[in-house]
Amino acid sequence: MTLRKILLTGTFLAGLASAPALAEVPELNSALSPVEGSPMVDLPASTKDSFVLGFSNISVVNTWRVQMVEELKYEASLHPEISEMIVADAGGDVNRQVSDIESLIARGVDAILVAPGSEVALNGALEKAYAAGIPTIIFSSNATPENYTVKLLADDAQFGRDGAKFLADVLGGKGNIISIRGISGNSIDNDRFRGVEEVLVDYPDIKVIDEGFGDWAYDKGKQVCESLLIAHPDVQGIWSSGGAMTQACAEVLEENGLPMIPMTGEANNGFLRIWKEKDLESVGPISPTWFGQQGVIAALRVLEGAPIARDNLVNPAPILKDQIDAFYRPDLNDSYWVGSTLPDEKLKELYGK
Amino acid sequence: MLLEVVDIAKSFGSVQALRGVSLALKPGSVHAVLGENGAGKSTLMKIISGVFPASSGTIRVEGQMVHWNRAEQARAAGVSTIFQEFILLPNLSVAENLFLGRELRTPLGLVDRQRQREESRRILARVGLDLDPDVLTGRLRVAEQQMVEIAKGVMRDARIFVFDEPTAALGDREAARLFDLIRQLRAEGKGILYISHRLPELFELCDEVTVLKDGQFAGHFAMQETTATELVTTMVGRTLDQLFPPHRTGGPGETVLELRDLRTTGFAGPVNLAIGRHEIVGLAGLEGQGQIGITRSIFEGHAPETGEILFEGLPLGHAGPAGGVAAGIGLIPEDRKAEGLFLPLSVARNIAVGLLSGKGLAQPASVPAEDIAAQIQRLRIRLRDAAQAISELSGGNQQKALLARWLVRGVKLLICEEPTRGVDIGAKSEIYAILRELADSGVPVLITSRELPELIGLCDRIVVVRDGATVGSFPGGTSTEEEIMAAAIGGQRA
Amino acid sequence: MTRAATAEQGQKIRARTLALLRGAMAIPAWPALILLLAIAAVVQPRLMSLPFLLIVLRQSVPLALAAIGQSLPMIGRSIDLSIGGVIAVVNVTLALPVFAGGPVWMSLAFPLAFGAVVGLFNAGLIAFVRASAVVVTLGVSVMLVGVSYLISGGAPGGSVHPFVRELATGRWGMLPVAGGVLVVAALMAGLMLRRSTFGHALHATGASYSAAWLGGLAVRKELVVAHMLSGIFAGLAAIILTGYIGTGTLNLGADLVMASVAAVVLGGTTFGLGAGGVLGVVAGAFALTFLANLMTGLGAGKPAQLIVQGAIIAGAAALARWREA
Amino acid sequence: MKLAGATTAVRLRRLSALPVFALIAVLAIVLGVASPHALSAQNLINILNQQVSLILVTVGQTIVVLTAGLDLSVGSVVSLTTAIASHGTPFAVPLAILAALAVGLVNAGGILRFGIHPILMTLSTMTAVQGLALLVRPIPGGTVPGWMKTYAGAEILGLPLPVICAAVVVFLAAVVVSRSRFGLHLMATGASAQSALLGGVNTGRIILLAYLLSSLFACLGGLNLAARLASGDPLVGQPFGIDSIAATALGGTQLSGGLGGVAGPVVGVLFLALLGNGLNLLNISTYYQMIIKGVLLILAVSAHRRNQPGL
């Protein structure tokens, strides 16, 4: 009797410490906020004591996604009520992701988490899951089924806006810039660039004189940047869709003996290192990897009947030059994406030098 | 006239294969086309069968002008050809091969295997073959394949039949069956073009004969009004004696190569053969009796089933042609284009290949321009310059380049399979002279040939091979074709 | 001069012009390069500046090295589609701390040795098991990419040895060091093809396998050496590419596989025939790299680049056949 | 390849597919023991439905391989098809088919008319058509006509309609390849184009048809994929080239031509899919899966010894 009381109190206290509202249900990260006008999810709480969660991931072909999946797995391991976390990786194949979701439905999981590889391709399968009464949590990138349970998305246009705003300010509203974009036709890249265009409308004297696609990769970025910088001697700034490509541009400038110019970056440890080492004029928009963690939390909230908005958007403020030291982790390698919620030992295991 | 061929010419690149050849085929007759290898018979037959078009000239079938550039068109016009090289597909069944291109079909449009099987049995029976029509063609014996090929040609509802050396691979009984078939076709009023250089069978079977020489029309005779001698003279253009260098008068010299009780795979054997230092020895025999097996056993060192090969008194124990070359043996293969030449490469490189064998890959490759030029001059290879691609040379000059390959290396024994296949007459006599010169200088030469006159004219000794066994030896020069044929056939066809 | 003689002379001149034209067109890389430079001179003169051309030269080094390697199996009538896998594995390996911090010879020896081993494995299956070269090397490539993911744990990164960086990005004055590496490698390969027994025998084997075998050449050994050299050149390309990038990254080199085949074909070499030599192959690689830069400069996106590249491969292959005929 | 005991042509062709049938049977037993879920009807239907596109593409690839050719461009045709079909106009589907046929025509034209090696020819169209696909639909998205979505979602007796359609198509293709005159001529052409030509086969027409069919089947695969994903994606077809070749080789169709059938390669697709699925269920990393796939590919092709080394 006493023992049980102590345990209950302990749980209660722990709950109080982390979140003021419901004791046992974890809260979403405060950087996630409901979209204006988003309805609240109104599914009844599950009657089960333990849950099987299914996660359909499109791929782990870049370090950002690797870290995101790690965050998801780690968060799931913290909750004893999650009896099993099934992770299905589609290896970049949307077709396979449809099957993965169908397979998760067939296995009767209690909730499906999806990091979609396409905005439209998964809609049919997601509708099927929803119709089967399985909560669907879409996060990290968008999918557009008519019915779904929760969405957690980043505003990719904000990434572009942050960068463009920085360039406009640092150039004093005048100058030529080039843009190093991600994968041609990729929706994230298009959204990011849309953000740039939105901002630059207000700065008619800033001209995007050329652009190239570096596929977010260091190697391609370097070639594209080199071609563009040699072709255009008169460039005052660079907008980049990703940190690896910014890093590549910095090296191109250095190797060719050109002066450093303002460039937009990204909140990635490798980029922060270069930023610091080379003392660049830059800004680091954040695209958080803790989506994985938040996806698990959202699923638990839905299953336990805790309040949660249907549509949520994340807008973390970009890292500024004077904040580098607060984020940079010299003890971790370049692949680390800053702002992780993973515990230190896990990060050291993944990214230890 | 069933078929009229008028003034046909054909050239392949710089090589003029046919020059103004004409021929007329009557219905109900067997018309022989005679000529040496390289005289243009096969080219003419391929033009008549539509395999490739003539460069100029006209073809008329029953008075109608025709223009063919695909075999199918000729076939549709009623020309059925039994080609010299097998065109059966090894991965299809006998029935599928027989009906290829004119499959019997079910009402659903699928291949009617049952009906084809039955029909095939009937057709095969007609040529005297008792084969399962479902069997893979690739698994048949060579003679069986040839008979299937003949069956395929004969079963067609054609008016003109072209037989291109059909008996080359046939045994006696099969050949007799074929002649019956041809006579039957003639009785039905068909026209038959028959290519062969076995004179006896031409006299047995044919009504008239057109002779080609060096790609040109050389004569036309009614079979009953001509003689073998007249045909040979027309075909060769001069008496054979002028073509060949004089035979050696001295002895054969000490033995260089000796085969003792050698049995090669697939043949009964055994082979017993010795070649002296100054000899040219020829292997004679019917098609596919193991002649090539013997030459390749010496050169490639195929492990003989039993017996041994002694070269300069020591046993040969190499594996692969590289070993043969290392031992000092050179081989000029029967299929020059496929197995001898590097067609896109220059003449110089083709010759210099002889020096590459056995060298470490990291060693410098020498292309000794002077030695090559000397051989080109010695062999009178006609070319623009040594950097010219060898594909542009005529057959005779290509063959000489292959000779040059081994002369540059300096071999101790030369094996020459079909030394003058597809070679014009002028180059022939030059090649013969070189081979004799080699033997005189102490490099013995072993040759195989389908041409008995060539063996008789050139060789010091002719060894007859039957079923992989040496069954007789004849002196060159004085032997007759009949003697050699009799030995080659054995008891079968006398 | 009689009319007949004039006509004859005219014919001779025509024949000679045709021969000359054929010679020039024989190696498509040269006319293609001239055309590209001409277009650049008109529409994008800044691409014709010396610094820019030197940059294109440096950018083309990994492709040129890979293509020289690729040309060897192709001359021998084989193909090596595994170079992408070799480059991927070498890249993530060189970015491991053991290599980045270790002695420099490790970073230089490992790629070459690894390439040689992969080439040996390929050739073993191709020459002795006689399996299809396309599928064998494709399968090896898939395997190696998997291995590269395993080595990097899917999260590559790290840095590479400073000497490797210097090799790829350093300069002597204006001249890129990588260009020097290419020149040395190309000279060695060219010398080997033109002068060594291996080069002559490989050409012969490509022209006719049966004739080479009957001519007493070590046909299988040549294929083994050709594939090993192809792997070694891929390893060398990987060193330069890795040094240029300075870190481990996923799927590095995937683009180089098809591009190397394209460069080889453009350089006048096709299956079984190495007409253009090493110089042609290098010119082909340079032309493709210049084309990519030109089209980027023209604002033509990736789609247009792919379409043009496809047309170039087909055109070059058709030209090669026309030359043979 | 020599298969011991195969003396009749029909048996040889049937035996060629035997190894892959044996492989899939062994795999099924292993999976059944290791994971009860693997062989559940729902999982198998899922796999089938997922593989419909690749099965269709592989049928086309097999036809080309039988002629001793190779079609590397199928993946790009799949991409282009989804790109066009997702443009939502009523003409999208016929247009996609026409585009695919044009690719097949270009491939065959280059090979027949200009004598370009099939590997180089289809490599060039693979590259160029990939560019076209990116041009038509730079960003994944768009939408397909309603009837296509209905088709993708429909079920008959618990079986997805695409699976039923694929089964019918595969059956017809198998009958055509093994029983029709065209199928026989494919094998004749693959064994020796020259002999087949002399023997009365219009080899030019056969090769033309083979490449047209290959592109057409790739287009059907693309249409199915577009319907399933209800959208277009300019890069979605990229894996189809290697995968279709792998399945064809695994299915016992000889890459040097002339021997094989449709059933083997289709089972090859299912084998690879079941293997991937099983490895996933057993939580084996995708990295190991790539290595296993490479090894399988090499083993499959090593079973077919050629007369002399080569492509």
Image: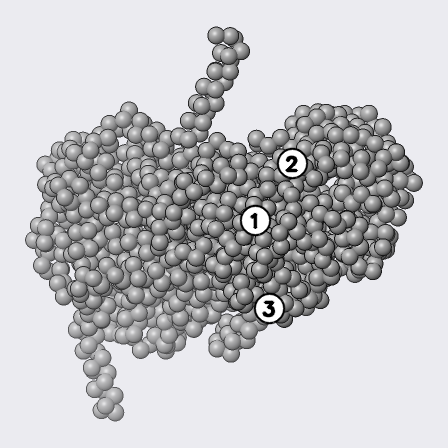
Q: In front: A268, or A217?
A: A217
Q: Which residue is mark 1?
A: B440
Residue A39, percent from left and from top: 33, 56
Amino acid type assigned to the residue bearing label 3 in the image: Glu
Task: Tell me: B344 left or right of C246.
Answer: right
Residue A330, percent from left and from top: 12, 63
Circles 2 and 1: CB distance less than 8 Å? no
Task: Tell me: B59 left or right of D293.
Answer: right
Mark 3 residue crowding within 10 angstroms, few (<14) / some (14–19) / many (20+)? many
State the scheme by which the image is colored: one colour
Q: Which circle marks residue B425 in the picture? A: 2
Image point 16% across, 31% down: which residue? A205
Task: Tell me: C149 left or right of B489.
Answer: left
Q: Where B228 falls versus A325 (above or below)?
A: above
Q: Where D184 falls versus D203 (above or below)?
A: below
Residue B195, percent from left and from top: 77, 41
Q: In front: D297, or D168?
A: D297
Look at the numbered disc 2 and give the secondary structure of its residue.
helix
Q: Which subunit holds the residue at mark 2?
A: B
Q: Which circle marks residue B308 in the picture? A: 3
Q: Which subunit holds the residue at mark 3?
A: B
- Tell me the distance, in whole angstroms, between the alpha carbons under discs 2 and 3: 38 Å
- Tell me the distance, in whole angstroms, between the alpha carbons under discs 2 and 1: 23 Å
- N-terminal of the two: label 2 or label 1? 2
- Could you confirm whether marks 2 and 1 are on the same chain? yes
Residue at the right extreme, as displayed: B187
Amino acid type assigned to the residue bearing label 2 in the image: Ile
Q: Which circle marks residue C301 in the picture? A: none
